[in-house]
Image: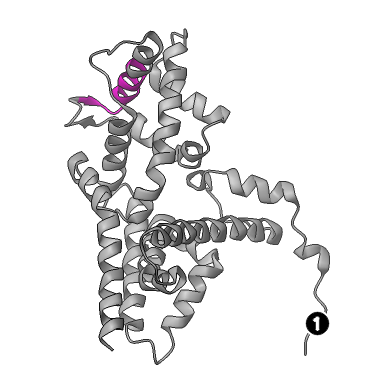
Amino acid sequence: MSTKSSKPDLLVTAENIQYFSEIDLGQLNDFPSARTDLVALSIRIDAAFRSLCELVREAIAQDYKAPPDAMLKVVISDLALNFIERYGALAFLSTGIVEILWNTQRPNWGQGLRLLSKVGQKLVIFSMSGRALRPRKTIDISFKLCKPAFLAELDRLSRELGRSESAEPWADQLLGLVRMGGYPMLKLNLTLLEQFLRSPVKNAVLHAKNAASADLLAEYGIGKELGEKREPCMTPDWFFYTWIAWTTNKTRSTIRREIQTAETKLKTQINKLLRVTRNR
């Protein structure tokens, strides 16, 4: 017997959706108890996954005459697994993720059980990260596709730091500027950025604590403002690699290589499918 649902319980305001679309999920300490909050958060998570899929679809369409939607299906399982590694159980709020996992349950899905076992492994990696165990994380095509946006923001941020006359430590100024807005990609990853810059452990590459990265990025920005090259300094590119290397527990050179080869791996998967299709 069904009961009539309460319509007001399903209404989600634009303000609620905007709040969850802009919040850094690393700052989400408690799972939403209100149904409207849960729906708004689900919209945010699903939009993030579908946006990633669309970026991959566009990248495929640039290089292949084959239907990009068909080619996307080749890699969508990997995209889903890595999305789960980054967001943990929150990833299951995405209907796109749930649809993929639903299909893997079907008896005719050849790799279904293998993929489902990998889901558990990805959840473990996410959980270990929250316990400061810092496992090595996956670098996939999403890093390649999102890198230009991060570099553009870091370049603008370096210039803003370069114009600053504040006596505050550069790391504090950097985090403050990101909190104030104008840097959407960095703000959505503010928790990771703050954990990186606040880490008390000496970085073997920098021969100093991670906070030195903010100092060096500021020196780069000062040089940009003055039209000169300053030493030592850190370009936005190297700041990005250093930060991601720390968050994924890999070396900076490894991160650079894996980001550069992510697109090659994607093309290899697609070309393999195309060869199989032509040989049928």
- Residue at 83% over, 78% down: 4
Part of the protein shown in magenta: 208-219
Residue 155 appears at what percent x and percent y?
Answer: 41, 27
Q: Mark 1: which secondary structure?
A: loop
7 or 163, which lies in front?
163
The correct choice, above or below, for 25 with respect to 264 in the image is above
The correct choice, above or below, for 254 with respect to 172 in the image is below
The correct choice, above or below, for 36 with respect to 105 in the image is above
Per the image, the residue denoted by label 1 is 3
Residue 166 appears at what percent x and percent y?
Answer: 47, 9
- Check the image and tell me how it is coloured: one colour
- Residue at 39% over, 62% down: 60
Residue 46 appears at what percent x and percent y?
Answer: 55, 61
Q: Is residue 238 left or right of residue 84?
A: left
How many numbered badges does the structure rendering display? 1
Residue 176 appears at what percent x and percent y?
Answer: 50, 24
Magenta span: chief secondary structure: helix
Q: Quadrant of residue 219?
A: top left
Q: Is residue 130 visible?
A: no
Crowding at dot 1, Cα within 10 Å, few <14 / some 14-19 / many 20+, comes out as few
